[in-house]
Image (cartoon, grey):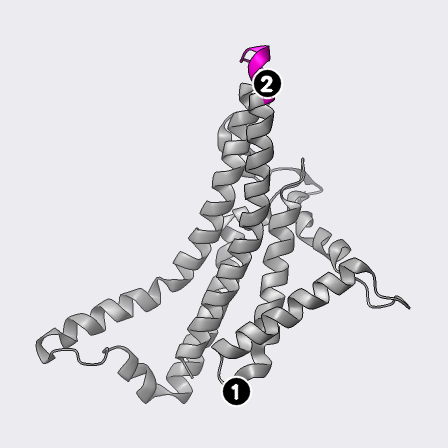
Amino acid sequence: MMTNLFSSFDPSTTIFNFSLNWTSTLLALIFIPSLYWMMPSRFNYIWNTIILTLNKEFSLLLTHKNASSTLIFISLFSFIMFNNFIGLFPYIFTSSSHLVMTISLALPLWLSFMLYGWINNMNHMFIHLVPLNTPTALMPFMVLIESISNMIRPGTLAVRLTANMIAGHLLLTLLANMSSSIALWLLPVLLCMQILLMTLETAVAFIQSYVFSVLSTLYSKEVN
């Protein structure tokens, strides 16, 4: 029995001092289509289509010089999407709903972009702190505002993904707990609401992984 609503997001199932809930991140390897088929399956065809589409879109966001780095963002999209999708199954811990997981993805990316930008393109990074046509009196404030906005980027990336995944799971948990206390004639209505919410959560699993990877792509573009 859950002690509170957030206990479903607590990775507390352990054996030999090893958290079993975090092993759900390895389940994504099962869903990755294998390349060792003589004839590609439909799932393999769909997945290749998604990868090619993402490659074209990320290549437009990045410069032609750095178009080959789309592999990083496609891999990031795949990892987050599979973890979001697996978390929709019962009794599987959604690792992407945990802030430790999301911040460990966002912070190294942001640090690598900042280090690369300040080491190789220092003048461009200084120019980026002051938007074009900014009045001279407002320049110190704009530098402060732009610096703060750059520093909170990994936090906003992590919190956005975590909050969106937790919100849907909480609603599903609340609706499931209501089933034991409502009238029988309301059960079909509750079931329809749960089906609609599960459909929405499936869409959110794809959308949030796409948003995370696209924002990371845009952040990398700014330092080049």
- Asked if the stretch drawn in magenta spans residue 167, the answer is no
For the record, the magenta segment spans: 180-188
Observer able to see residue 111 = no
Residue contact between numbered discs 2 and 1, judged by CB atoms under 8 Å:
no
Q: Which residue sits at x=52%, y=47%?
A: 98
Which residue is located at x 50 percent, y 33 percent? 171
User: Which label lies toward us, 2 or 1?
Assistant: 2
Q: Amino acid at mark 1?
A: His
What is the three-letter code of the residue carrying label 2?
A: Leu
Quadrant of the image for the C terminus?
A: bottom left
* Left or right: 85, with 10 as reference point: right
**Quarter of the picture holding the N terminus:** top right
Q: Which residue is mark 1?
A: 64
* Residue at the spot of label 2: 187
Tell which residue pokes out farthest to the right in this image: 38
Q: Residues within 10 Å of mark 2 (few under 14, many from 20)?
A: some
In the rendering, at what x and y percent does residue 22 appear?
64, 48
Q: Position of residue 57 (x, y in %)?
A: 54, 73
